[in-house]
Amino acid sequence: MLRKCLFPVAGYGTRFLPATKAMPKEMLPLVNKPLVQYGVEESIEAGLGEIGFVTGRGKRAIEDHFDTNFELEHQISGTGKEKYLDSVRKVIDEANFSYTRQGEMRGLGDAILQGQRLVGDEPFGVVLADDLCLNDGLGVLGQMVQLYKQFRCSIVAVEEVPREHIHKFGVIAGNEIKPGLHQVTDMVEKPAAEDAPSNLAIIGRYILTPDIFDLIRETPPGKNGEVQITDALLTQAQRGCVLAYNFKGRRFDCGSVDGFIEATNFVYENVYLPKQAELEKK
Ligand code: UTP
């Protein structure tokens, strides 16, 4: 039943200016592959091949990336360079892409609400591509899909973060129902360290049930006039059930310059070089 995944990509990526002046931050390359492609591959692996982008102005490069480029393909057809397009061709074959726009940047909750046009009345995944999640085994979204099949309710991915960083995240409180899995009892967006209900921070992977759309509509704008998904999720947790899953794997905050550099170094050593060695054998 889970088939669809939303990618809210309307943000400006101001932390990477001027690189992101004319180019979406999701197209910044982690070595040789744009950030957003890692997220889309994770979604396909999880079985969510219906990909919906919530875009904004200046994001057309994302649409072009997930489409055929006939001129380029013709140019390199039959040469040794064709293999460098393998990964994106595979993604284009295995997924379907649709797009809608968030007219105004009114927060992540609002961006997800705009995605209702693409998702309809089904449960769906959400990937924030600037959180890069890597795992040796099944990817983070795949792990969450397995949990969804068991519990059939909204799930947020969380990780333990040091107190000094907790003010940058949505933070949960909850009852641990099994190791690494909490039933959420409270959620606070970007709390001061002394007010944080735990050290479990929400990161950019969600499975949401479609009743979330009405809850977002009910949610008044919070900090900075933005509609926070955290507020709608708290209502969902209070009326029903939301789970917080401490995932297996590693997350890099590629929305920040430091996290992006750390991810680049990691991917170069652990993903790019081994893959390159494999390609050279072809
Ligand atoms: P961020 O808070 O990282 O903001 O958004 P940003 O604008 O992308 O980056 P900076 O802070 O200016 O550098 C988190 C995610 O939510 C999406 C963003 O695209 C990003 O994936 N988002 C946020 C929207 O799609 N719409 C919004 O109104 C807000």
Image (cartoon, rainbow, N blue to C red):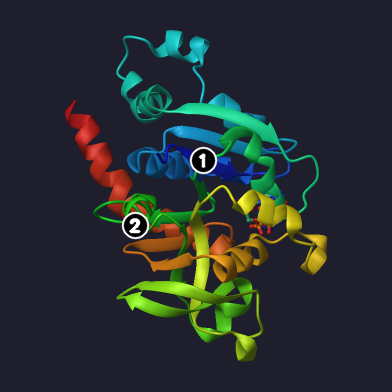
Name the side, left or right, on which 71 lies relative to 141. Answer: right
Spot occupied by residue 27 in the image (x, y as percentages of width and height): 56, 40
Q: Mark 1 points at which residue?
A: 122
Q: Which residue is drawn at 27% across and 38% down?
A: 276
In this view, the residue farthest toward the left is 281
- The local crowd at label 2, few if under 14, some if 14 to 19, many if 20 or more residues have their Cα within 10 Å, is some
Spot occupied by residue 240 in the image (x, y as percentages of width and height): 53, 65
Q: Which of 209 and 221 is in front in this view?
A: 209
Comparing labels 1 and 2, the label whose residue is closer to the camera? 1
Q: Residue at x 48, y 56 (%)?
A: 205
Q: Is residue 4 above or below residue 216?
A: above
In this view, the residue farthest toward the front is 239
Q: Mark 2 points at which residue?
A: 147
Q: Which of 150 and 44 is in front in this view?
A: 150
Spot occupied by residue 196 in the image (x, y as percentages of width and height): 59, 84
Q: Distance between the residues labelled 1 and 2?
A: 17 Å
Of the numbered discs 1 and 2, the one sitting upstream in the chain is 1
